[in-house]
Image: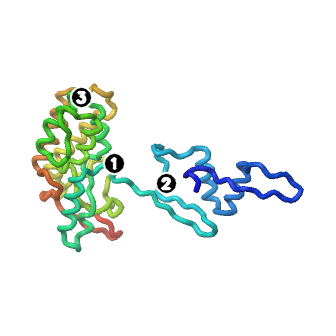
């Protein structure tokens, strides 16, 4: 078995009266691989040879095909679900089991209203004193999020807790089953009759604050702005929603389009 990303080398048997062939050249390897697996594999092998993949490079494909004889074997990389804490996972599982099977698609997964990538970015901009201030106030109204003790807070631990704040969740269909999922491009707000729900309105303020300071240098965000435009609305959203994973009962439901995908009413 060879390591992932390492170019394949095939032993070449010597002909009678000829010297043993040395290692195959890049051209020989390319031609051999082309005969075996086709042009797509050649392109992938050349890319791997120029840029060996490492654990953090971000270039690992979702699916990798390798030719074994005449059979193509598909190996799928598993996406690690590394942001949900144990309490969040357990509550989502319990909620999914409680719904009618007829609407199971509508309770399939969690979406963040404020993208977790934005929350992670902001946590990295705060001073230690500001990180502690967030923990002191938000942990009280989001006890299941897993906020650390004030004395042991770090940017990484704050990022994890902010990603697990229940008030920032929307329960709904998987992203690929929606035609209105914003991903990380903007807030995934709840609306009713075209009007943003009260909880989402507070989280819109949180998102706007992060957007305003997206290019800020670490340690330069004013304390008063952090309090008024991030901590206070986040606390208010938590108080409106409650401490557990669940639906926002003030929002409208889902509709299904002719393409079979869901969108918010």
Mark toward the viewer: 2 or 1: 2
Q: How is the image coloured?
A: rainbow
**Residue 10: % across, % down:** 70, 56
Mark 3 neighbour class, 10 Å CA radius: few under 14, some 14 to 19, many 20 or more: some
Mark toward the viewer: 3 or 1: 3
Label 2 SS: loop
Q: Which is more toward the observer, 127 or 186?
A: 127
Q: Visible in this render: residue 90? A: yes
**Residue 28: % across, % down:** 73, 53
- The answer to which of marks 3 and 1 sits earlier in the sequence is 3
**Residue 69: % across, % down:** 63, 67
- The answer to which of marks 3 and 2 sits earlier in the sequence is 2
Q: Please name the residue that numbered disc 3 is placed on.
A: 128
- Dividing the picture into quadrants, the one containing residue 172 is bottom left
Label 3 SS: helix
Mark 2 neighbour class, 10 Å CA radius: few under 14, some 14 to 19, many 20 or more: few
Taking the spot 26% from the left edge, 46% from the top edge, the residue there is 163
Q: Which is more toward the observer, 190 or 73?
A: 73
Q: Visible in this render: residue 237? A: no
Task: Tell me if residue 150 comes above or below residue 191 in the rendering.
Answer: above
Picture quarter with the C terminus: bottom left
Taking the spot 23% from the left edge, 48% from the top edge, the residue there is 164
Taking the spot 18% from the left edge, 51% from the top edge, the residue there is 196
- Dividing the picture into quadrants, the one containing residue 110 is bottom left
- The answer to which of marks 2 and 1 sits earlier in the sequence is 2
Q: Please name the residue that numbered disc 2 is placed on.
A: 61
Q: CA distance from mark 3 to mark 1?
A: 26 Å
Callouts 3 and 1 close, C-beta under 8 Å: no
Q: Which dot marks residue 153? A: none
Mark 1 neighbour class, 10 Å CA radius: few under 14, some 14 to 19, many 20 or more: some
Q: CA distance from mark 3 to mark 2?
A: 37 Å
């Amino acid at each position: 078995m060879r390591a992932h990303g390492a170019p394949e080398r095939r032993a070449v048997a010597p002909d009678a009266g000829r010297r043993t062939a040395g290692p195959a050249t890049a051209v020989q390897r390319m031609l051999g691989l082309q005969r075996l697996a086709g042009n797509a594999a050649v392109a992938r092998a050349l890319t791997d040879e120029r840029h060996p993949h490492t654990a953090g490079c971000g270039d690992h494909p979702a699916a990798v095909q390798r030719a074994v004889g005449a059979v193509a074997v598909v190996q799928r990389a598993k996406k690690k679900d590394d942001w949900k804490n144990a309490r969040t996972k357990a509550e989502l599982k319990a909620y999914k089991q409680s719904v009618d099977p007829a609407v199971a698609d509508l309770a399939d997964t969690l979406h963040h209203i404020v993208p977790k990538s934005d929350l992670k970015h902001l946590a990295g901009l705060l001073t230690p004193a500001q990180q502690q201030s967030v923990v002191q106030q938000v942990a009280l109204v989001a006890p299941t999020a897993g906020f650390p003790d004030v004395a042991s807070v770090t940017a990484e631990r704050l990022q994890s807790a902010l990603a697990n704040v229940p008030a920032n969740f929307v329960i709904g269909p998987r992203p690929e089953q929606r035609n209105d999922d914003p991903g990380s491009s903007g807030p995934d707000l709840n609306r009713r009759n075209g009007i943003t729900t009260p909880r989402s309105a507070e989280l819109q303020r949180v998102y706007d604050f992060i957007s305003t300071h997206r290019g800020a240098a670490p340690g330069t965000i004013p304390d008063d702005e952090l309090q008024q435009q991030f901590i206070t609305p986040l606390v208010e959203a938590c108080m409106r929603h409650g401490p557990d994973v669940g639906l926002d009962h003030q929002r409208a439901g889902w509709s299904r389009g002719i393409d079979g995908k869901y969108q918010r009413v």
